[in-house]
Image (spheres, rainbow, N blue to C red):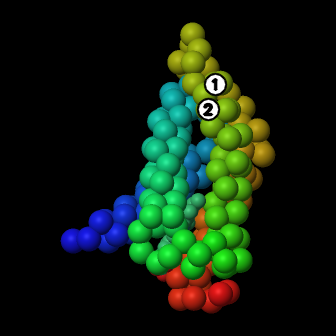
Amino acid sequence: MSLEILVRYLHFIGIFTWVSALVLQWVLLKPLLSRQQIQQLAKIDMVYGLSAMLVVGMGLTLWFGLGKPTAYYSENPIFHAKVGLAVIVGLLSIYPTVFFARHRKGDDPTSEVVLPARIRQVVTLELVIMLVIPFLATLMAAGVGR
Ligand code: HEM
């Protein structure tokens, strides 16, 4: 098996894990959250972060290291749109991450925290963008936009 195939495989595994973590967060986000629920969300957020790093790491390897020439991607505006959207998802995720990290700890594990409505909206937006990215990826891999 070539290294390129392994990298492509890991790019996909990262994507599945990233989207799974997002869906889990989306399902678990309730208007009132116990400290325990926030700790669970923070753990899922760690999986989210690690999988995002895997996707970006493997994506950059495919861009600059293996497979098609770097210019194949660098000269394609659809590829730039895809990477731009991935960056936007990453930036959007900062808000929930900071919220979970801030409210993870506390003396009383039974105390509840009110979830700002914005957080669920941000996670929903992230999910929608994550659905668009594979479409752009498929287009650019097929050579559209060159
Ligand atoms: C900065 C982040 C990313 C970079 C640099 C990147 C880069 C790449 C590259 C270079 C390829 C190879 C395309 C080819 O076969 O010629 C690829 C494939 C792909 N990427 Fe990404 N990617 C990133 C993030 C994402 C994300 C977040 C998703 C999904 C939500 C995604 C979905 C895909 C898919 C589905 C393919 C396979 C396309 C196909 O073969 O039809 N990528 N990516």
**Percent from the top left, x then y, of residue 21?**
49, 51
**Percent from the top left, x then y, of residue 138?**
54, 82
Q: Considering only vertical position in the picture, is 93 above or below 58?
A: above
Q: Nearer the viewer, residue 40 or 89?
A: 89
Badge 2 marks a residue whose secondary structure is helix
**Percent from the top left, x then y, of residue 67?**
42, 74
> Residue 115, located in which quarter of the rendered image?
top right
Left or right side of 24 for 96: right
Left or right side of 140 for 31: right
Q: Residues within 10 Å of mark 2 (few under 14, many from 20)?
A: many
Q: Which mark is residue 100?
A: 2
Quadrant for the C terminus in the image: bottom right
Badge 1 marks a residue whose secondary structure is helix
> Residue 84, located in which quarter of the rendered image?
bottom right
- CB of mark 2 near ligand 1 (< 8 Å): no
Per the image, the residue denoted by label 1 is 103
Residue at 63% in and 24% down? 103
Residue closest to the far top: 107
**Percent from the top left, x then y, of residue 3?**
30, 66
> Residue 98, located in which quarter of the rendered image?
top right
Q: Which mark is residue 10?
A: none
Residue at 34% in and 69% down? 4
Tell me if label 1 and label 2 are in contact, CB under 8 Å. Answer: yes
Residue closest to the far left: 1
Quadrant for the N terminus in the image: bottom left
Residue at 72% in and 32% down? 114
- Please, what is the three-letter code of the amino acid marked with disc 1? His
Residue at 48% in and 54% down? 57
- Please, what is the three-letter code of the amino acid marked with disc 2? Phe
Q: Considering only vertical position in the picture, is 94 above or below 20?
A: above
Q: Nearer the viewer, residue 118 or 57?
A: 57
